[in-house]
Image (spheres, rainbow, N blue to C red):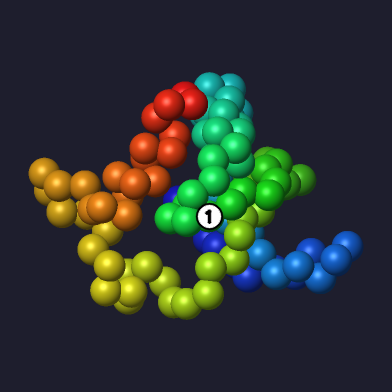
Amino acid sequence: MGAVYEVKRTSDGRRMALKVLTRAMSGPDAARFAREAEIGARMRHANLVAIFDVGILSTGAPFLAMELVPGGIARGSGVPLWRPGRVPSHCSAASRTASPRF
């Protein structure tokens, strides 16, 4: 799907996460990616990372510049990412942030 890198913005030195998808997108896929990034950038909640920028690299691969969250990768965090039939409370709280707006 992609890779996430820790980067530093040259203009102000801000550290952030850069998610780069592994394949170029066009047409409906690119439009969907841009729409999801636009929606994500407008949402604010303690359980959501902030999206600062979105774009397409010269290779055609899309990217998201996001808030850098300290810590390890999610798989090692001890927080279950999914349990069939149940939405974790931290996810449902974040989704309530989006529901009234979109």
**Considering depth in this image, is 51 or 5 the residue closer to the camera?**
51
The vertical placement of 79 against 2, above or below, is below
Judge whether 63 appears above or below 97 on screen: below
Asked if residue 59 can be seen in this view, the reply is: no
Q: Residue at x 85, y 66 (%)?
A: 12
* Mark 1 neighbour density, 10 Å: few (under 14) some (14–19) many (20 or more): some
20 vs 14, left or right, is left
In the foreground, 16 or 101: 101
| Residue at the image point whose x is 76% and y is 68% from the top | 14
Disc 1 target residue = 49
* Residue under the point 47% across and 56% down: 46
Task: Note whether 81 is above or below 98 in the view shown.
Answer: below
Q: Can residue 74 be seen in this view?
A: yes
> Measuring 26% from the left and 52% from the top, which residue is drawn there?
89
Q: Is residue 87 left or right of residue 15?
A: left
In terms of image quadrants, where is residue 41?
top right
Q: Identify the residue at the far left of this view.
A: 85
